[in-house]
Image (cartoon, helix red, strand yellow):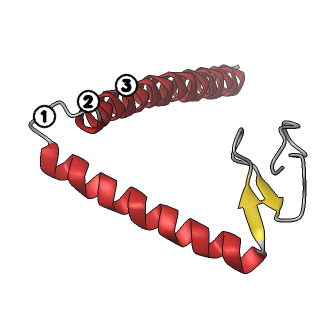
Amino acid sequence: MAFLDEVKKFGKSIADKSKDVIEVTKLNSQIATEKDKIKELYQKIGEHVYNNYVAGESTVNDELCAEIKEINAKIEELSAKVLELKNATLCPNCNAELAKDVTFCSKCGAKVKE
């Protein structure tokens, strides 16, 4: 009987540990979700600060905002080169990439050229 008692204890121990692993996994998932919420809030704060900078309001982060502005200009320049190489253009309404010879946007239906 002592052997069966040991097997029961071992089985119970495994069951308890598996429950703990499941609980830890759930908790870690909840922690990751909360951290993602914080990241989203950080991003919103950053966007708010940058939008204030673009609107002409002075911030303590003017240097960083100016750097973002320069990077955005570079991105626009590089994107224009890519469109040129692809012989494409952007829809003025939804910014979908379109062939230069189309009259209407295939994504939103807006008229692209006269």
Q: CA distance from mark 3 to mark 2?
A: 16 Å
Name the N-terminal-most of marks 1 and 3.
3
Q: Residues within 10 Å of mark 2 (few under 14, many from 20)?
A: some
Circle 3 residues within 10 Å: few <14, some 14–19, many ≥20? few
Dividing the picture into quadrants, the one containing residue 54 is top left
Please tell me the numbered disc located at residue 52.
2
Q: Residue at x 82, y 65 (%)?
A: 100
Three-letter code, disc 3: Leu
Nearer to the camera, 4 or 20: 20
Instruction: Calculate the distance from the C-alpha at mark 1 to the C-alpha at mark 2.
Output: 8 Å
Question: Could you tell me which residue is drawn at 13 percent across and 34 percent down?
Answer: 59
Q: Residue 59, which numbered label?
A: 1
Indicate the position of residue 52 as horizontal and vertical percent values: 26, 30
Instruction: Answer with the quarter of the image where residue 19 lies.
Output: top right
Left or right position of 75 against 3? left
Pointer 1 with pointer 2, Cβ within 8 A: yes
Residue 33 vs 87, above or below: the answer is above
Tell me: residue 15, above or below residue 83: above
Q: Quadrant of the N terminus?
A: top right
Residue at (14, 44) in percent of width and height: 62
Residue 85 x %, y %: 71, 80
Q: Say which amino acid is labelled 2.
A: Asn
Residue 64 lies, in percent from the top left, at: 20, 50
Q: Nearer the viewer, residue 38 or 94?
A: 94
User: Residue type at mark 1?
Assistant: Thr
Report the mark closest to the observer, 3 or 2.
Answer: 2
- Mark 3 residue element: helix
Q: Residue at x 42, y 67 (%)?
A: 74
> Which label is found at residue 41?
3
